[in-house]
Image: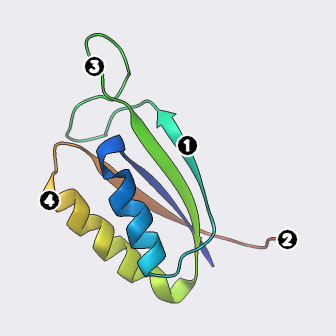
Amino acid sequence: MKAVFIAYDQAHHHKIIDTLDRLSCRGFTSWEQVSGRGSNTGEPHYGTHAWPSLASAILAMVPDDRVSSLLARLKAIDDESPRLGLRAFVWNIECAI
């Protein structure tokens, strides 16, 4: 089992939920409004007058055999609109209840 943290522009929300559904990745927690900026490119998401957009985030628990497919689909979403911003990070899950 892996934890996949996905930070993305709010415009991507429905595509990401649909992607998780299609891959049968059921367990996740989402945060509708988060702020931040990418490390390399893209616009900041601060929710301010100067930078009005906000981001969202999802922490999904994903079976090992689905992680590669999920990352490939997320990359395709990001490639469609690279200025919006979408990043995903994978962690090992040591144990869970």
Q: Is residue 49 above or below residue 27?
A: above
Between circles 2 and 1, the one closer to the viewer is 1
For the residues labelled 4 and 1, the Cα–Cα distance comes to 23 Å
For the residues labelled 3 and 4, the Cα–Cα distance comes to 22 Å
Q: Secondary structure at mark 1?
A: strand
Say which label, 1 or 3, has the lower sequence index: 1
Q: Is residue 57 left or right of residue 68?
A: right
> What label sits on residue 97 in the rendered view?
2
Say which label, 2 or 1, has the lower sequence index: 1
Amino acid type, callout 2:
Ile
**Quadrant showing the C terminus:** bottom right
Amino acid type, callout 3:
Trp
> What residue do we see at 40% from left, 31% from top?
36
For label 4, count other residues whose C-alpha is less than 10 Å away and answer few (under 14), some (14-19) or many (20+). Answer: few
Identify the residue position indicated by label 1 in the image: 31
For the residues labelled 1 and 3, the Cα–Cα distance comes to 19 Å
Mark 2 in CB contact with mark 3 (< 8 angstroms) = no
How was the colour assigned to the protein in this rendering?
rainbow
> What label sits on residue 51 in the rendered view?
3
Amino acid type, callout 1:
Trp
Identify the residue position indicated by label 4 in the image: 80
Say which label, 2 or 3, has the lower sequence index: 3
Q: Secondary structure at mark 2?
A: loop
For label 3, count other residues whose C-alpha is less than 10 Å away and answer few (under 14), some (14-19) or many (20+). Answer: few
> What residue do we see at 26% from left, 46% from top?
85
Q: Residue furthest right?
A: 97
> What residue do we see at 15% from left, 52% from top?
81
Q: Nearer the viewer, residue 29 or 14?
A: 14
Percent x, y for residue 16?
Answer: 38, 61
Percent x, y for residue 71?
Answer: 36, 72
> What residue do we see at 20% from left, 40% from top?
41
